[in-house]
Amino acid sequence: MTIRPLQKVDFPDVIQLYKNCFPKTLMAIIGPQVIQKFLEWCLQKNHYFFVAYIKNQPVGFVSGYYYMKGEPFIHSTSELALFLRKDLINSLLKQPWKVFHPTVVKKILKHVKHQNSNVVGENDIAVSSELSILSIGVSPNFQRQGIAEKLTQFVTSFALEKSITHLKLTVETNNKAGLNFYSKNGWSNLLITKDYIVKHKYLTNE
Ligand SMILES: CC(C)(COP(=O)(O)OP(=O)(O)OC[C@H]1O[C@@H](n2cnc3c(N)ncnc32)[C@H](O)[C@@H]1OP(=O)(O)O)[C@@H](O)C(=O)NCCC(=O)NCCS
């Protein structure tokens, strides 16, 4: 297995891989145009997207972002929503019936609530360096073969190269595979809510 950074030429294969790994997410429901926009977001500065290949076939990926102490903090939820907004609206205008899909309704309501709560500031500065895993997925046919473990090890080395020793991620409380995976790999709970758990991990250089 090889792991390498996403390139634009990989987009068609990786869009399909994303749909296989996350068939029920908003982006998979709305369509490839939005997944492609997400991939473009992942190629921005301070973001990463690594793809695992077996015999030239993409079988898994891990994506996220990082910031260094004293640098602008990345508000992934609001920044990604803003980045995707135009393409989301355009895609929905072309297929308006999808507005009534339960996942789409839930996400729109959440976005409105988040915007009104105004919790995040635009110019916040990070008080410590941190790397977040935004999503990790392995193609169903290749699961439970240690691919996600290898992908997270790859991200760990990537973080350590940048002297980042604190990793974070969010997992939904109903994601049994994800919860088991993170427990098995030494992640601990930082925040528990009804819908999701924020997990974190401190790295050492050993
Ligand atoms: C979570 C996920 C990334 C794990 O990938 P993976 O390559 O199968 O994981 P690994 O082989 O490295 O690790 C296997 C461990 O993960 C957990 N796990 C994986 N799939 C599981 C499942 N279906 N049910 C319960 N636990 C599971 C177990 O702890 C398992 O260890 P075990 O086989 O000894 O029981 C994969 O199931 C997936 O892509 N799920 C869909 C997308 C997703 O939910 N991503 C995580 C949230 S962002």
Image (cartoon, rainbow, N blue to C red):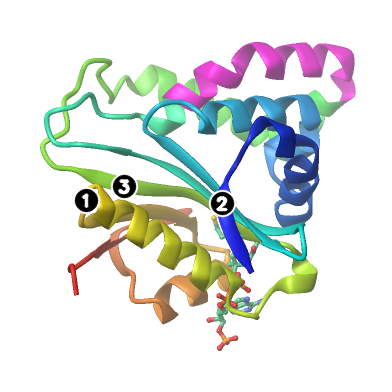
Give the amino acid at mark 2: Arg
Segment colored magenta: 79-97
Give the structural element (helix, strand or loop) at label 3: strand
x, y (%) of residue 134?
47, 46
Q: Earlier in the sequence, mark 3 or mark 2?
A: 2
Residue bearing the label numbered 3: 131
The quadrant in which residue 120 appears is top left
Badge 2 local density, few (<14 within 10 Å), some, or many (20+)?
few
Q: Secondary structure at mark 1?
A: loop
The majority secondary structure of the magenta stretch comes to helix
Ligand 1 image-quadrant field: bottom right
For residue 160, side relative to residue 175 (left or right): left
Q: Looking at the rendering, which quadrant does residue 152 occupy? A: bottom left
**Is residue 20 among what the camera can see?**
yes
Q: What residue is disc 1 on? A: 164
Give the foreground label among 3 and 2: 2
Side of 101 where 34 appears, left or right: left
Residue 23 visible? The answer is no
Q: Is residue 141 above or below residue 43?
A: below
- On whether ligand 1 comes within 8 Å of the CB at mark 1, the answer is no
Image check: 158 left or right of 81?
left
Kindly identify the residue that appears in the image at 59 percent across and 26 percent down.
40
Amino acid under label 1? Ile
Q: Residues within 10 Å of mark 3 (few under 14, many from 20)?
A: many
Q: Label 2: which residue?
A: 4
Between marks 1 and 3 in the image, the one whose residue lies nearer the viewer: 1
